[in-house]
Amino acid sequence: MPSSSSLPSDPGRPGPSSGLWRDADFRRLWIGQTASQLGEQGNLVVLPLLAVLTLGAGPGELGVLRAVGQAPVLLLSLCVGAWVDRWRTRTVMVVADGARALLMGAAATAGLLGCLGPASLPALAFTVGALSVFFDVAYQASLVRLVARDRLASGNSALEGSRSAAQFGGPALGGALVSLLSAPAAAAADALFFAVSCGAVGRIRRTESIPDHAADPPRIRRRILEGLRFVAGDGTLRTVCLASAAFQFSLAATMTVYLPFLPRELHLSGAFVGLALAAAGPGALLGSLLAARLPGRFGYGPVLVGAAVLGDGVFLCVPALRPSSAVTVPALLAVGFVSGLGGQLVNVAVMTVRQAVTPDGMQGRTAATITFVGMGSAPFGSLFGGFLGQRWGLRTSLLVTAAGMMMSPAVMAASPLARLGRVLPVSGDGPLTDTHVGSTATESTVSDLGTASRSLAPSRVRPLGTNPRARPPETFPRDAPGGRQPEADP
């Protein structure tokens, strides 16, 4: 296996002088990841509406359906991370999205024929959720196997931009298809998105370097513990993990109070509530574009801390708003936009740093560990926000939870992460040299991305260091360039 130090000079990978958008394999990866995210995010609306409109499900049943769909993140993330480190990420993504396409196609057919039963949708939600964990962990581990390390910021910027667009456009498209056609037709559209992703990722032709398979591979428990120890023992990754947990806990608490605060305290209609939430989309897209350039100009540490303070601290303005004020709606739109902008800057920058400091053989387990810790704190944050809302009222509780969101930038500011400059840290794969990420390496990608994603409109979600609702792509076998023969898929 070639060491990570060879990546920038690998003849099969685009180097600093080549634009990512001129690389056919990266374009295929980007298309596949975008289509997959549209299908995944659309499912967040389509499956509940399929339950309501086809089976007549009530609030209780919907709560169970959502919980079952979210359970695989906590149950499977660590195991999947250990497995992905031993598999080709292209293979994992192709199988996961091929299976999701078949399942959603079957659900659409059953819905049209009236064959869906009360137990079938929870089973479908769990299975699709489990496959989503496989795809998301693999896609986070994949980019470092496809591009040179000094292209990570540009690659993550492009991928996070499309993911953010899907988080906004996927549910909107799913809801529109349900309204215009039917819930089964919307499920069929999701199946089509997964099929497009499977086809695009499957056409990537570059050979993917994966760690050598030992004759007697360690047990899954040992591999999971190796991932946990690696994250806990690295100061940068430990900070990312703690900041992620702090952010997810505080964000869940804040959103639990924020959503009822808008209609009950500010007397906003459902349309204005949706508009306030949707404002994060354009901000996140702009954040994706800036994330390819700002770290090369100001350094990763200042960008991370500054963007986190901006994106999280803006919620402190909301409790001061009053109903029937001329500034209320514009202020909420500004809050959504700024939170999306800051959150996406952190997303891309922290993902690039995480990939740079992690050896190729630990990428899957590192992503899964941070996802597990970060997303695992969200349910407790929701309970805490609900408890405060009942005890102290919505306005006071929102002030407290919004202040709590400053814990994440405080953790980063007090750590070595805040002192990172324009030079990416390096992993322990081999005798790596520092990789400078400056404007020269990213300028063409930024301008290309601005053209490619001008029509997209994303949404805010920022699990630090992954993109639980977040993640990067990969490199793959088949006719390898440079005369290298592809290895057999496991």
Image (cartoon, rainbow, N blue to C red):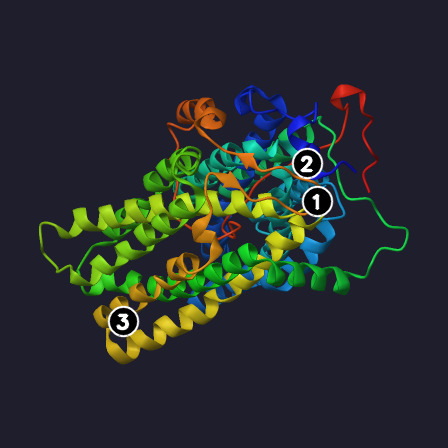
* Residue at left offset 17%, top offset 46%: 330
Give the distance between the C-alpha atoms of the residues marked 1 and 3, in whole angstroms: 46 Å
Placement of 385 over or under 32, stated as above or below:
below
Residue 466 or residue 458, whichever sits in front: 466
Q: In this view, does 21 lie to the left or right of 178?
A: right
Mark 2 = which residue? Answer: 5
Q: Position of residue 324 (x, y in %)?
A: 9, 56
Identify the mark nearer the N-term, 2 or 1: 2
Q: Which label number is shown at residue 397?
A: 3
Judged left or right of residue 256, residue 57 is right
Amino acid beneath label 1: Asp
Q: What element carries label 2?
A: helix
Q: Position of residue 122 (x, y in %)?
A: 58, 60
Q: Which amino acid does label 3 sit on?
A: Ser
Q: How crowded is mark 2: few (under 14 residues within 10 Å), some or many (20 or more)?
A: many
Q: Where is residue 392 in the image (x, y as percent from the top left)?
A: 25, 78
Q: Quadrant of the N terminus?
A: top right
Tell me which label, 3 or 2, sits earlier in the chain.
2
Question: Within 10 Å of the Cα at label 3, are there few (<14), some (14-19), or many (20+) other Cα atoms?
Answer: many
Determine whether label 2 and label 1 are within 8 Å by CB.
yes
Q: How far apart are marks 3 and 2 (CA)?
A: 49 Å
Q: Is 60 located above or below residue 95 in the figure?
A: below
Which mark is on residue 344?
none
Q: Name the residue under label 1.
A: 429
Relative horizontal placement of residue 87, taking residue 8 as reference (left or right) = right
Residue located 51% across and 61% down the image: 374
Quadrant including the C terminus: top right
Secondary element type, mark 3: helix
